Amino acid sequence: MDSRLDYYAASPRAMKAMMTLEAMTSTLSIEGPLLHLIKIRASQLNHCAFCTDMHSIDARRLGESDRRLYAVSVWRSSDFFTAREKAALAWTEALTQLTGSDVSDEVYNELRVEFSEAEMVDLTMAINAISSWNRLAVGFRQKPSN
């Protein structure tokens, strides 16, 4: 499938707003390695090959292991992730898959144990941002470079 359009060229003002959101989320309280894990997981759930590829590469640059990256999609049955990371991944899945469900008290309470209130909002904003990027990339068929 070919790309449909260059959304940066089509609407520079909209993309400037997206870049501002992205820049803001990367300076908040969520540590870089965890930020990439949640971006990878949301991108997997949203079937975004471009963002999954990009954030896997970025995570490796930050020292993330291949084993953990391979296990992101099966994090619940893996011992590679901390309680904090698992709470963030569960929150990511709950917010990314809102259709037909809500966010359970169990997932929320697990998040509260591992994150401060500010961190919970910051994490949610990062999930919102990657979900928006996913929708742009999937909708307009942006592909990873070979």
Image: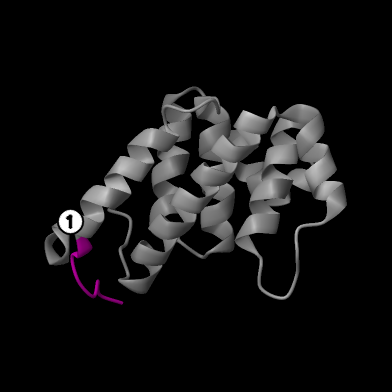
- Residue 14 in view of the camera: yes
Residue 118, x across and y down, in percent? 61, 30
Label 1: how many Cα within 10 Å (few below 14, some 14–19, many 20+): few
Task: Identify the main secondary structure in magenta.
Answer: loop
| The N terminus - image quarter | bottom left
**Residue 5 forms part of the magenta stretch:** yes
- Residue 52 in view of the camera: no
Give the farthest residue toward the left. 9
Q: Residue at x 50, y 43 (%)?
A: 126
Please tell me which residue lies in front, 91 or 34: 91
Q: Residue at x 76, y 38 (%)?
A: 111
Question: Which region of the structure is painted magenta?
Answer: 1-7
Label 1 sits on what residue type?
Arg
- In the image, 66: left or right of 20? right
Q: Residue at x 54, y 28 (%)?
A: 33
Above or below, comparing residue 47 to residue 61 in the picture: below
Q: Quadrant of residue 55?
A: top left
Give the farthest residue toward the front. 117
Residue 16, x across and y down, in percent? 22, 49
Q: Which residue is mark 1?
A: 13
The secondary element bearing badge 1 is classed as helix
Above or below, comparing residue 5 to residue 16 in the picture: below
Please tell me which residue lies in front, 81 or 71: 81
